[in-house]
Amino acid sequence: MKILISTDIEGVAGVFHAEQVRAGNGEYERARAWMTAEANAAVQGAIAGGAEEILVNDSHGGFRNLLPDGLDERARLVLGKPRYLGMMGGLEEGCDAVFMIGYHSRSQGRGILAHTINSFAFARVLINGMELGEAGLYGALAGEMGVPVILATGDDVFISETRDTFLGAEWVQTKVAHGQGSGVTLSPAASRRAIAAAAETAVRKLQSKAGSSSDPKPVPFRIPAPIECRLQTQSAALADLFCMWPTLERVDGVTLRFTVDSMQSAVRTLNSLAAMSFMLR
Ligand SMILES: [Zn+2]
């Protein structure tokens, strides 16, 4: 069994402030070590549960936060951008399941450091009428490739908005959000212990034959094509810029839409728009 561990930083225990997730300061250097340690806890648990091969994907910002020399040597690391599959980079190799570690809730919500892909550019993303955050968008990308999300970790807001998306998954609540920049966290050590235990359970459950109605087997999260994406931007100037792209249709001052034939195309389009947005920063 081969597992992809996609690792973001905003949902990691101990992380609350923008400085902790932005390179170039001491706070970040400590936070990226906690992020690496939570990834390692997931590796350890997956192997204890029977996984034979592990890829760890660095899924935050520039996709180069995890410390390669701190990574469990039983895993390989997916680093750097751009990459077509973004936070799911590594699935090209073929994987049986995905873990989402250190994830966060979507933009406009009340979770810690909540945003969707790019906090400067995107206010809301709806796919076929469903509002999704990063977990939903990338979970649907994995689902399109036939791969279920079997473990996800982050704050309580993240879990409550995502739980129904990944039926049968295991969850670890690392923090309780009191707002964008405040709340209550597990200690990093307690968080790592909980993640390792849940990772082991998740891999064992995927390998076992039967689920039950109270504890179903995980299934891929699939959104049938065509994929209509409605995107609300953070400003009208961003919508002006994005609609330079001729296949994007303006709906109103801050809303545009496009239709594509796959989640991969939708995610690639969103990531291209996020890159374009740097022009207006
Ligand atoms: Zn992030």
Image: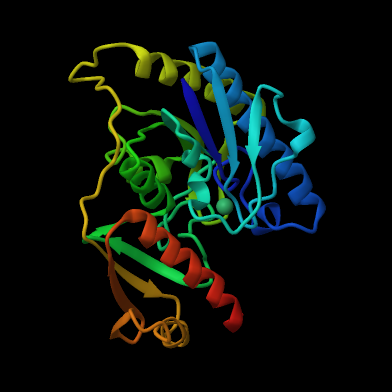
Residue furthest out toward the right: 26
Q: Name above or below for residue 158 compared with residue 272.
A: above
Image coords of residue 83 (percent x, y): 55, 55
The answer to whether residue 260 is seen in the rendering is yes
Residue 34 sits in quarter: top right
Q: Is residue 164 left or right of residue 75?
A: left
How many tags in the picture?
0
Q: Is residue 249 left or right of residue 133?
A: left
Q: Name above or below for residue 246 compared with residue 79.
A: below
- For image coordinates 69% across by 58% down, the residue present is 22
Image coords of residue 128 (percent x, y): 22, 60
Image coords of residue 122 (percent x, y): 44, 69
Asked which colour scheme the image uses, the reply is: rainbow
Residue furthest out toward the front: 93
- For image coordinates 56% across by 16% down, the residue present is 47
Residue 66 sits in quarter: top right
Q: Name above or below for residue 22 compared with residue 55.
A: below
Q: Is residue 39 left or right of residue 136?
A: right
Image coords of residue 244 (percent x, y): 43, 86
- For image coordinates 37% across by 52% down, the residue present is 137
The answer to whether residue 187 is seen in the rendering is no
- For image coordinates 20% across by 16% down, the residue present is 212
Q: Name the one closer to the observer, 84 or 165.
A: 84
Quadrant of the image containing the C terminus: bottom right
